[in-house]
Image (tube, rainbow, N blue to C red):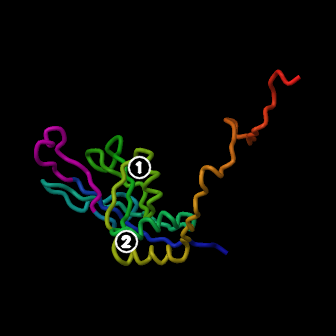
Amino acid sequence: MTFQRPSIEVSVVMRRERIEGPASRWQTWRWVLDEVISGAPDFGAEPRLLYKNDSGERWLHTGFSVELFKDDAEGYYLNATTPAPCWFVLWRMEEEAGIADEPMPKPVAVSLSYHDAGRWLDAQETVEQLPAPAPVVAWLQAFVDEHHVLETKRRKRPESFRSLTDRFGNPVSISTEKKSGGGHG
């Protein structure tokens, strides 16, 4: 018996656009996340140039699977309950040109989890987001409804009731009796 996690196959479109204004003195082009397409057919493993003109170009990257894991239900909950649930896409620039004449971005992973996006950002990765379409949000919400359990808030015990410990974490006892001293003889 094999268990299969809920998943969606997606493709990522990256767009190269011309930079206008004063910033163009240092950099004339930039890459941005343009689109995440759910349920897209597989066009092969290699990136495909969709179009190219003087103002920019678009590349399609296929073959990404977005899986939902029960132990990350909290991350999906945080995304599904925002005003604008979204895709999170981790991408990196090529070190050297591989497919095109110049280095281009390579999407690495796509997720619907806030926790994934947070871990990627903590690792100093490039992460962009785009709004998820309504059918994907409904699919995500159904998973959250089935697997996410809200933690009940417990009353915090006042600090005065906490047991005392020394700097090594050992219990400390306090007494009002004098243990040593002189002159009682």
Quadrant where the image shows the C terminus: top right
Q: Position of residue 103 (x, y in %)?
A: 30, 45
Q: Which residue is mark 2?
A: 38
Mark with earlier residue (1, 2): 2
Q: Amino acid at mark 2?
A: Ser
Q: Nearer the viewer, residue 95 or 164?
A: 164
The alpha-carbon separation of the residues under discs 1 and 2 comes to 24 Å
Residue in view at x 57 percent, y 68 percent: 152
Residue in view at x 44 percent, y 77 percent: 139
Which secondary structure, mark 1?
Answer: helix
Q: Amino acid at mark 1?
A: Leu
Residue 2 appears left or right of 95: right
Q: Nearer the viewer, residue 17 or 47?
A: 17
Quadrant where the image shows the N terminus: bottom right
Q: Please identify, in this view, whether the residue under mark 1 or under mark 2 is nearer the observer.
A: 1
Q: Position of residue 71 (x, y in %)?
A: 57, 64
In the image, residue 69 above or below residue 94: below
Label placed on residue 121: 1
What crowding class fits label 1: few (fewer than 14 Cα within 10 Å), some (14-19), or many (20 or more)?
A: some
The part of the chain drawn in magenta is: 17-34
Q: Does the stretch in magenta take in 26?
A: yes
